[in-house]
């Protein structure tokens, strides 16, 4: 993902990006172990309800954002 983001930024900012190599061997195994042993994975997020959306309305700063989310929650 980092290399894809770097390529995107490179195209948009006209700067050089040198892709990072993928981890191999022990470094790859440490990353995998850390990921699978992590307890931060809590499963799926709670569904957005109309009540939750109404309580967060004041925090939505983009014009039309509340209406967009409201339509999505309604269906």
Image (cartoon, rainbow, N blue to C red):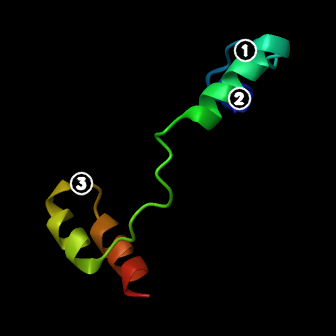
Q: Secondary structure at mark 1?
A: loop
Find residue 48 and report its image quarter: bottom left
Which quadrant would the C terminus be assigned to in this image? bottom left
In this rendering, which labeled residue sits more in front, label 3 or label 2? Answer: 2
Give left or right: position of 66 versus 38.
left
Q: Position of residue 42 (x, y in %)?
A: 46, 51
Q: Position of residue 17 (x, y in %)?
A: 72, 14
| Mark 3 neighbour density, 10 Å: few (under 14) some (14–19) many (20 or more) | few
Name the residue: 29% across, 56% down: 62
Q: Kindly check if marks 2 and 1 are in contact, taking CB atoms under 8 A apart as contact.
A: no
The disc label shown at residue 61, or none: 3
Name the residue: 59% across, 33% down: 37
In this rendering, which labeled residue sits more in front, label 2 or label 1? Answer: 2
Name the residue: 49% across, 61% down: 44
Residue position for label 2: 32
The disc label shown at residue 75, or none: none
Q: Kindly check if marks 3 and 1 are in contact, taking CB atoms under 8 A apart as contact.
A: no
- Using the image as rendered, state which of residue 14 and residue 27 is in the foreground: 27
Q: Secondary structure at mark 3?
A: loop
Q: Kindly check if marks 3 and 2 are in contact, taking CB atoms under 8 A apart as contact.
A: no
Q: Position of residue 72 (x, y in %)?
A: 42, 78
The disc label shown at residue 17, or none: 1
Q: Is residue 1 above or below residue 44?
A: above
The answer, for residue 6, to whether it is visible in the render is no
Q: Earlier in the sequence, mark 3 or mark 1?
A: 1
Find residue 9 and report its image quarter: top right
Kindly report the distance in space between the C-alpha atoms of the residues bearing marks 3 and 2. 38 Å
Q: Is residue 19 above or below residue 32?
A: above
């Amino acid at each position: 993902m980092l290399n894809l983001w770097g390529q995107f930024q490179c195209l948009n900012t006209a700067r050089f990006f040198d892709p990072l190599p993928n981890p191999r061997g022990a470094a790859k195994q440490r990353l995998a172990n850390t990921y699978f042993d992590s307890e931060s994975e809590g499963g799926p997020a709670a569904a957005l309800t109309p009540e939750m959306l109404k309580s967060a309305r004041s925090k939505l700063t983009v014009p039309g954002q509340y209406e967009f989310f409201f339509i999505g929650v309604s269906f």
